[in-house]
Amino acid sequence: MKRCPYCNRILPAEDERGAISQEDLRKFCLERKFVIFAGDRVDEKTAAALLGKSNGTLRNWRGTGRPLPYTRSGAGRGRPYYHLKVLAEFLNRADPE
């Protein structure tokens, strides 16, 4: 059982292969009433909670080109959003820090 290092909440369960799926993250968000936007996207705060990182860490990663793809709303200048599929893939890889 993996816990968030910041809030101590239980993070989504891993399946038999030890992998976390996009559906697991979606259920986790819905149970905690996190908002999921169209295209299975979540905002920075929710992504940070799912990854067990702070919002500042995600901002630093974006500024230094760390390997966590994101999109921006509007004409590319809006708020950053993260796809649940990308977050699941990231969680299933070795932690970069």
Image (cartoon, rainbow, N blue to C red):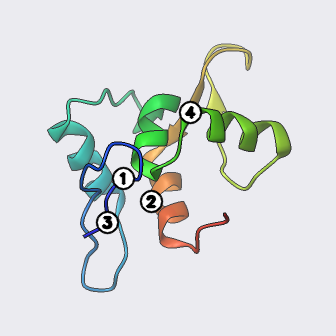
**Residue in the foreground of this view, choosing between 97 and 41:** 97
Choose the circle earlier in sequence order: 1 or 2. 1
Identify residue for label 1: 4
Separation of marks 1 and 4 at Cα, in angstroms: 13 Å
Choose the circle earlier in sequence order: 2 or 4. 4
Identify residue for label 2: 88
Report the residue at 25% width, 85% height from top.
16
Q: Residue 81: x and y, percent?
A: 55, 31
Which structural element holds mark 3?
loop
Q: Nearer the viewer, mark 3 or mark 2?
A: 3
Quadrant location, the C terminus = bottom right
Separation of marks 1 and 3 at Cα, in angstroms: 7 Å
Q: Residue 67: x and y, percent?
A: 72, 56
Which structural element holds mark 1?
loop
> Are discs 3 and 4 less than 8 Å apart at CB?
no
Separation of marks 3 and 4 at Cα, in angstroms: 19 Å
Q: Which mark is residue 55?
A: 4
Is 37 situated left or right of 89 in this image?
left
Identify residue for label 3: 2
Report the residue at 48% width, 64% height from top.
91
Which structural element holds mark 2?
helix
Residue 82, visible in the rendered structure = yes
Q: Residue 15: x and y, percent?
A: 25, 76
Q: Nearer the viewer, mark 1 or mark 2?
A: 1
Report the residue at 66% width, 47% height from top.
69
Choose the circle earlier in sequence order: 1 or 4. 1
Callout 3: few (<14), some (14-19), or many (20+) C-alpha neighbours within 10 Å? few
Callout 2: few (<14), some (14-19), or many (20+) C-alpha neighbours within 10 Å? some
> Are discs 3 and 2 less than 8 Å apart at CB?
no
